[in-house]
Amino acid sequence: ETGVTQSPTHLIKTRGQQVTLRCSSQSGHNTVSWYQQALGQGPQFIFQYYREEENGRGNFPPRFSGLQFPNYSSELNVNALELDDSALYLCASSLNPRSDQPQHFGDGTRLSIL
Amino acid sequence: DQQVKQNSPSLSVQEGRISILNCDYTNSMFDYFLWYKKYPAEGPTFLISISSIKDKNEDGRFTVFLNKSAKHLSLHIVPSQPGDSAVYFCAAIMNQGAQKLVFGQGTRLTINP
């Protein structure tokens, strides 16, 4: 069973640029969530996709957007990058969006903004 | 507004003894609680969860206790092993809307030989 995989592992961008991060969900999982983890903090929920539709959003501005594809893989796009966007971006997948289904995380993409 | 809090940034325990990690929450609408373990350069790994209708859940060396009246949960690891050294995150989720995990800030557990 293949777990959650994310690419790239590291990325360096400059302010104002745009970035796309990718995530392949665990086999059989149709729900994908994205989290941002700043240094020394717990992960913060960005949004969730279920069967290709956005299923909820955290307190992030519209320049954070996403997609889920028919194979349930997902992308996170961030426009107009700011210095505060420097963080670890984690993708998690689950069997479905029920609260009793554990979310399984990838190893993340470390994004650095210069 | 920190709805889930882990007030101890770090904890050091002797190998073979019990490790107790604590977590407090403020939102009574949470209905599931989870613990994740995180090694450096890896994503969080799911450890154990508990429903709000239970007060204890056990899985091998790991036991989670929930005290709803105090809005407090704890993770007990016994016996502690060197491989348990990691950052532990407590998380909570509501049974409505998106499957949004609300995390604490984490506790770094170090197991000393």
Image (cartoon, coloured by chain):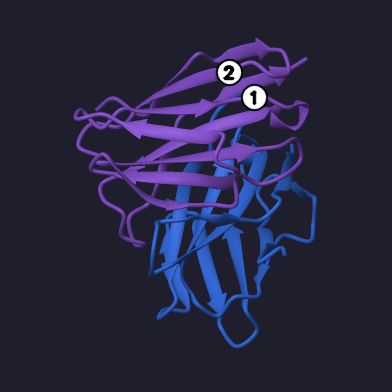
Chain A drawn in what color? purple
Question: Does the rendering let one see residue A110?
Answer: yes
Q: Nearer the viewer, residue B101 or B16?
A: B101
Residue at (26, 39) in percent of width and height: A52
Which chain comes out blue in the rendered image?
Answer: B
Residue at (48, 21) in percent of width and height: A21
Amino acid under disc 1: Ala
Which chain does tag 2 point to?
Answer: A
Amino acid under disc 2: Gln
First in sequence, mark 2 or 1: give its number: 2
Badges 2 and 1, same chain: yes
Pointer 2 residue: A18
Secondary structure under tag 2 reads: loop
Query: Residue B87's x, y, as percent?
Result: 67, 42
Pointer 1 residue: A80
Question: Does the rendering let one see residue B78?
Answer: no
Q: Which mark is residue A110?
A: none
Query: Residue B38's x, y, as percent?
Result: 59, 37
Residue at (55, 18) in percent of width and height: A19
Asked whether, in this view, residue B45 is left or right of residue A3, the answer is right
As measured in the structure, the alpha-carbon distance from the residue carrying label 2 to the one carrying label 1 is 6 Å
Q: Quadrant of the N terminus of chain A?
A: top left
Q: Quadrant of the C terminus of chain A?
A: top right
